[in-house]
Image (cartoon, rainbow, N blue to C red):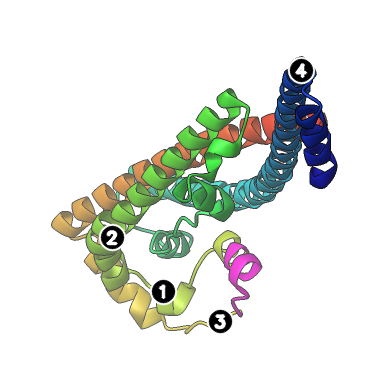
Amino acid sequence: MIKFFRKIRQDLLSTGKIGKYLKYAVGEIILVVIGILIALSINNWNDNQNQLKQETTHLQNIKNDLKAQIKTLDNYIEFQNLIIEDSKNIIHHYENIGGFNKMDSIYPMLNDLIVRTTFINKNISLSEIINSSEINILKNKVLKRKLLEFNQSVLTFMNTTQNNNTNLIDQLIVPTLAKNSNYATFGYTNGMNNFLEKNGGRENITYLKNNNLKNGLIQTFNDPKLSLELINKVVIRYELASLQKIGNENLKEQAKDILIAITKELDKK
């Protein structure tokens, strides 16, 4: 093709047809420019198609992760409800019985308060596209902002949960409960046992049947100083569980809202 165009130029020049040559040269330049523009358009179209496929893949992965996160949040909410109910029952018993007496129904609830959960971030795909800056591929700016805000909310809540677990539950509450509870005889409540078995494959435990342990603990529990310390820590555990539940519920609402937005966005593709 190049030889063909070169021959035409040479023929025009050799015959002295300068005007026709110039027109031809201009025409040839225009053809070259058009060819370049077509090539660029094809490249841009290919790039857009690749980005569209990549965006769709990212959105689908994020959607799957959000579903998994919502499932774990439901789990956490169920757990916090157990702790809240146990704490309320212990406080109610303490107020109405006049201290820590008639404890058989209360020991398992106190033992439940030793258990706590670790928040797990299921949003791996979202974290990856944020860290790699591929989140900029997303064309929906509102959705992009929601995802960034959700990611920050998850990280903040995860850190708060870890700090509460370490500094308040593990270091402040658990030592008192573990030291003075009667786990060896009573273990956890049925509700907590069912939760643990459902989530961790925990086997049932056969507990000791020793009345001497119970009798000794009644005197220990009703020491005024220990009694006050213990009920204060039950109240703190109740407040922590209530705050954790609110945090889990807020994250769940955010996740559900984003899930709807992603589904609508994928339906457009």
In depth, the one of 20 and 199 nearer the eye is 20
Is the N terminus in the top left, top right, bottom left or bottom right quadrant? top right
- Amino acid at the residue labelled 4: Lys
Q: Which residues are magenta?
A: 195-203
- Amino acid at the residue labelled 1: Tyr
**Mark 3 or 2: the one toward you:** 2
Task: Name which of mark 1 and mark 2 comes first in the sequence.
Answer: 2
**Mark 4 or 1: the one toward you:** 4
Q: Which mark is residue 11?
A: none
The residue labelled by disc 3 is: 205
The residue labelled by disc 4 is: 23
The residue labelled by disc 1 is: 183
Q: Position of residue 252 (x, y in %)?
A: 58, 38
Q: Tell me if residue 207 is in the magenta stretch.
A: no
The residue labelled by disc 2 is: 166
Q: Residue placed at 49% from the left, 57% from the top?
A: 120
